[in-house]
Image (cartoon, rainbow, N blue to C red):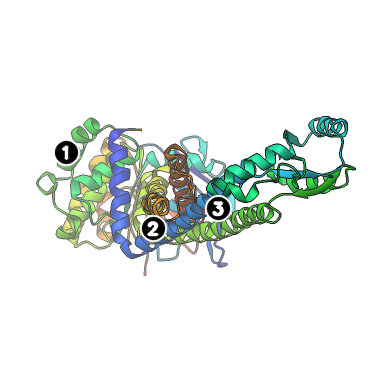
Amino acid sequence: MRLRTVRYYFCETIQSILRNSWLSVASVGVVAVSLMILGSSLLLVINASNMAANLESSVEMSLFLKDKSTSAQIKDLEDKLKAMPDVAQVEFVSKQRALEEMKKNFGDKKDILAGLEEKNPLPDAFRIKTRTVEQVAPLARQLEGLAQVDQVRYGQGVVEKMLAFSRWIRVAGLVTMVLLGVAAVFLIATTIRLSVFSRRKEIGIMKFIGATNWFVRFPFLLEGMFLGLAGSLLAVAAIYFGYFTLIGNIQVSLPFMQLVSDRDLIITLMERLLLLGLVIGAAGSMISMRKFLKA
Amino acid sequence: MIQLYNVTKIYPSGVKALTDVTLRVHKGEFVFLVGPSGAGKSTITKLIYREEFPTRGQVIFNGKNVIRMRQREVPYLRRAMGMVFQDFRLLPQKTVFENVAFAMEVVGSSGRDIKKTVPKVLNMVGLTKKADVFPGHLSGGEQQRVSVARAIVNNPVLIIADEPTGNLDPETSWDLMNLFLNINKRGTTVIMITHARDIVDAMKKRVVEMAGGQIVRDEKEGTYRYEA
C-alpha cells in the first residue's frame, strides 16, 4: 500500500469521525461501558478462582478416629488413605501431638490444659488434603463410612459457596458481555451507516472513477476500528486505575483479602480487551458496509 | 470497440427503456446520442460502464463481455473510461487539483506521477491558474472542465459524456466541445448524449437518434433533426 493511500485513508477516517461527532462519542461510550463490565467481571472471576484456589490449598479435612483404634488399624487406614486417587496428602496427628498444638495455641493460658496429659480427651486424627477443592465433599462422605472413623470435619459450606459464586459470576459476566458486545457492534454499525450515507455522493464518484470496493471500504473500516479502540482504551484505563486503587485500599483495610495483583496477568487481560474493542469496531463497520457497498 | 447486441432493458419498475438495440462504436469515433428524454440514451451508457445489466442481449467492451464480468473486475473496466456528467459531480471539499488527483489516487498512482500529470491535464483544459480553488468558487464551465480533466487524467480509451453542456451557456458549451474534439483527435473514443442542436449540426459527427427505446436513425456526419 502506498504511503499516499495510507494518508488518504487516515484523513478520511478522521474527517468522518468529526462529522458524526455525537454518534461517534455514543459508540465509543457503549464500547467503553461494555468492555468495562466485561473487564470487571473477568477480574472478579479471576479473583474468585484465585480465592477458591487459596482455600483449596488451605482446606483440609480432619478425620477423627474412634478411641479404641489400635496402632495396627491406624497404620492400615493410613495406607488405605494414601492409596486413594483423590487424596493428595495424609498426615497423622496423634492425641499427644494434638494436645501439644492446642497448648501452643493457648500460649500463656496453657495452664488450663494442665493435667490433661494423664487422660487425654483428644482423639487420634488424620489431616487430609485433596487434589482439588471439588473433591472435598464427596471424599468426606466416603470416609465417614470407614470402620475406624468417628467423624469427618472440613469447612463444610464455605468451599461450595465459593465455587458457586465464581461460577455464577462467570455466567452473569458472559451474558452481560455478550449482550453489551452486540449492542456495541450495532451502535458502531449505525454510526458507520450514517457516515456512509452522508458520503454516498462521494462513494458514487469513487465508483465511476474506478475505485475498488476495498478502496471505498477501507476508511469506513478504519473508522469503526478507531471507535472500537477508543472505547476499549477508555475501558482499559478505567479498569486499570480503578483496580489498582482498589487493591491499595483493600490491603490497608482488609489485609486478609488477597486480590490478584500480578501486573503481567492484568496487562495481558487489558491487551485482550483492546483487541476485542478493535474486533467489535471492525465487525460493526463490516455489517453496515455489506449492505451499502455491494455493487 | 463497443458492441451492443439485441439489447433489451426493462427496469424493475416495469419501464421498458430499450427494445432490441444493436449498436457498434469503433475506436476513435465521436458519437452523438440524441433523442427525447426517456428514449434510452442514458441507459445505453449505463450498460457500457455496467451501472445496469441488460434484461436481454450482450454488451461487449474492448472484446470483453461486460455482463459476464465479475464484480471485482468492474473497477478496472471503469478505469478504461472517463465519465462526464451534466451535474459535474466534483468533490466540493477538495480543490481543483485534488479533484483531478483523486482519480489518480483511486487507481493507485504514485505521488510523483500525480504531481507530474495533473498540471499537464489542467493546462490542457485551461485551468492551471485555478488549481487551488474549490469547485464552489468556479463557474459552471470551469467546473465542467475540471470534471473533463478528471475523466481524461488516467488516459481512458473511451469518454462517456452525459449532457455535458446541459447546464452551460452556448459560448461556454462551444469551448467545452472543442476540448472534447481535441481529446477525440488524440484517438480517444467519445460518446456524448446531448440536446445541443446547433453543436451537433455544426460538428458533422456520427449521430445516433433514439426514440421510445429504439435507434431510429444512425448517420455518419449527421445532424440533430429530431422535432421536440
Residue appearing at x 38%, y 50% in the figure? A248
Are the numbered discs 3 and 2 placed on the same chain, yes or no? no
Of B158 and A225, the residue lying toward us: A225
Tell me the kind of residue under disc 1.
Pro
Q: Which residue is mark 1?
A: B119
Q: Which mark is residue A28?
A: 2
Q: Which residue is mark 3?
A: B54
Element type where label 2 sits in the image: helix
Q: Above or below — where is B3 with respect to A89?
A: below
Q: CA distance from mark 2 to mark 1?
A: 42 Å
Chain bearing tag 1 is B
Q: CA distance from mark 3 to mark 2?
A: 45 Å
Q: Position of residue A156 (x, y in %)?
A: 71, 54
Is A45 left or right of B132, judged from the image as shown?
Answer: right
Element type where label 3 sits in the image: loop
Q: Position of residue A292 (x, y in %)?
A: 47, 56
Q: CA distance from mark 3 to mark 1?
A: 39 Å
Q: Earlier in the sequence, mark 3 or mark 1?
A: 3
Q: Position of residue B21 (x, y in %)?
A: 53, 53
Tell me the kind of residue under disc 3.
Pro
Tell me the kind of residue under disc 2.
Val
Are the numbered discs 3 and 1 placed on the same chain, yes or no? yes
